[in-house]
Image (tube, rainbow, N blue to C red):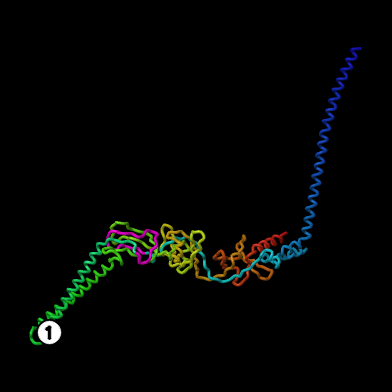
């Protein structure tokens, strides 16, 4: 009885283990089946989205085809002609013309200019340097050797014409005065001798009438008078020389005797002082240099081909590096005939007024010279020129709503106008502002003709 019970218990344990393994196997078979079902549902959803997207694209394409003429009309383009079936050799659209009605012109902001004949003037922008005009600069030297007693100015001071700038203790002034006095005395002595000789001759001529003197004596007295007259002329010349020398060295009005002053003959600014107090200087030294800054020169450096374009009389504009200052106008006085070997340039000398001493010597400035090239040419506004792969073009207005593309050959190009050597005739109307829109419309129409 006990044995039977143990055997039954063992059989039940084996049955339980087999049942557990069977359940696990069934569960593992159910998991892949569920995953496959989920993937199938996702694939179905994606397929539905693709179908809807394709339907939307088809609807949009159909709408664009139906309303294509209305869209072209809104853009200002003439409606495209319907294709002619069975005419493969039909003529294509004119690649050089654009048709655009008034509404379309207004929409792209189209403006117009006129091709006109004008004098060709090329603006040349070059660097320059300010310099004093040599005709307005004076180098003051001492009039005689001496020691510097006073110095009234320094560089940068403004002076007036006739102003004393320095004073020297001039020993040469005393020598000039003494020489002048001696010459005056000699002149007086010569004049007295002349008077005596004249009197002796007169008496001899009277005595000769009565036989009081011989003819030879009268002739001798005539020779004495001639010698006295020559001595007077020599004394006069000597006295005049010493007088001029003394006046040149004489002190200015109110100056101390025996002194010599350095006086400026022009008004301007002191640019340099070459002497010091107590120094003994001679007449070869520049004591003070004065320049008039109210009118100056600008030396504009010209390179290469610009040398043949700029000539005397051309107008120029000079821009100062000082912020907020308006450009100053001047005129080319001359172009140097020799090149500077260090820069390989030739300076053009430009004269201009300098109000308020705005420009200073040795200041670097920017110069624009209006070089007159000596010829006339046809020009159009710079905004009328459009660039393409084939070269520059312009759109000429041939009717109220039609524009013709013209290939251009350009000459001188400025910021405000461009010289046209071929492509446009004088008097023709060209599109300026908005001409880029015409180029875009032409390109779009050419691309559309291939669709």
Residue 430 magenta: no
Left or right relative to 449: residue 312: left
Q: Nearer the viewer, residue 128 or 5?
A: 128
* Residue 331 x %, y %: 46, 67
Q: How crowded is mark 1: few (under 14 residues within 10 Å), some or many (20 or more)?
A: many
Q: In this view, does 55 lie above or below 439?
A: above
* Residue 126 x %, y %: 48, 61
The residue where tag 1 is placed is 205
* Residue 122 x %, y %: 52, 66
Q: What stretch is highlighted in magenta?
A: 138-163
Identify the residue shown where x is 71% and y is 60%.
448
Q: Which of 143 and 361 is in front in this view?
A: 143
Residue 152 magenta: yes
Residue lying at the far front of the rendered structure: 254
Identify the residue shown where x is 84% and y is 25%.
20
Q: In this view, does 227 lie above or below 124?
A: below
Count of residue discs: 1
Q: Is residue 312 visible?
A: yes
Kind of element beneath mark 1: helix
Classify the position of the C terminus by image quarter.
bottom right
Classify the position of the N terminus by image quarter.
top right
Q: In which quarter of the image is residue 332?
A: bottom left
Residue lying at the far right of the rendered structure: 1
* Residue 253 x %, y %: 31, 67
Q: Is residue 143 visible?
A: no
Left or right relative to 239: residue 116: right
Q: Quadrant of residue 422?
A: bottom right
Q: In which quarter of the image is residue 60?
A: bottom right
């Amino acid at each position: 009885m006990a044995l039977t019970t143990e055997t039954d218990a063992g059989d039940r344990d084996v049955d339980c283990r087999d049942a557990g393994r069977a359940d696990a196997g069934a569960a593992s078979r159910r998991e892949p089946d569920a995953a496959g079902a989920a993937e199938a549902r996702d694939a179905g959803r994606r397929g539905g989205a693709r179908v809807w997207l394709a339907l939307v694209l088809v609807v949009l394409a159909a709408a664009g085809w139906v309303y294509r003429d209305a869209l072209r009309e809104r853009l200002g383009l003439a409606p495209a002609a319907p294709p002619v079936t069975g005419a493969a050799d039909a003529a294509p659209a004119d690649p050089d013309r654009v048709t655009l009605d008034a509404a379309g012109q207004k929409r792209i902001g189209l403006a117009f200019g006129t091709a006109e004949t004008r004098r060709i003037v090329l603006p040349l922008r070059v660097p320059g340097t300010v310099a004093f005009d040599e005709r307005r600069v004076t180098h003051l030297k001492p009039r005689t050797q001496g020691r510097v007693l006073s110095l009234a100015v320094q560089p940068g001071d403004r002076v007036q014409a006739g102003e004393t700038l320095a004073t020297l203790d001039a020993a040469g002034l005393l020598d000039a005065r003494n020489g002048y006095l001696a010459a005056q005395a000699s002149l007086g002595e010569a004049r007295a001798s002349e008077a005596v000789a004249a009197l002796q001759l007169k008496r001899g001529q009277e005595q000769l009438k009565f036989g009081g003197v011989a003819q030879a004596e009268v002739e001798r007295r005539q020779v004495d008078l001639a010698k006295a007259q020559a001595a007077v002329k020599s004394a006069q010349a000597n006295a005049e020389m010493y007088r001029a020398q003394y006046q040149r060295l004489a002190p200015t009005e109110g100056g101390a005797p025996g002194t010599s002053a350095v006086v400026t003959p022009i008004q301007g600014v002191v640019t340099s002082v070459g002497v010091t107090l107590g120094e003994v200087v001679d007449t070869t030294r520049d004591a003070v240099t004065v320049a008039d800054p109210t009118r100056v020169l600008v030396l504009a450096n010209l390179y290469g081909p610009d040398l043949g374009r700029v000539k005397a009389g051309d107008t120029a504009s000079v821009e100062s590096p000082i912020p907020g200052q308006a450009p100053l106008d001047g005129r080319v006085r001359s172009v140097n005939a020799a090149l500077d070997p260090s820069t390989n340039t030739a300076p053009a000398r430009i004269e201009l007024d300098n109000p308020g001493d705005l420009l200073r010597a040795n200041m670097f400035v920017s110069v624009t010279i209006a070089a007159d090239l000596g010829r006339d040419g046809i020009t159009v506004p710079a905004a009328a020129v459009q660039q393409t792969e084939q070269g520059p073009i312009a759109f000429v207005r041939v009717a109220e709503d039609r524009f013709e593309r013209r290939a251009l050959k350009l000459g001188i190009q400025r910021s405000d106008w461009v010289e046209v050597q071929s492509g446009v005739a004088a008097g023709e109307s060209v599109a300026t502002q908005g001409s880029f829109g015409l180029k875009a419309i032409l390109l779009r129409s050419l691309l559309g003709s291939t669709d």
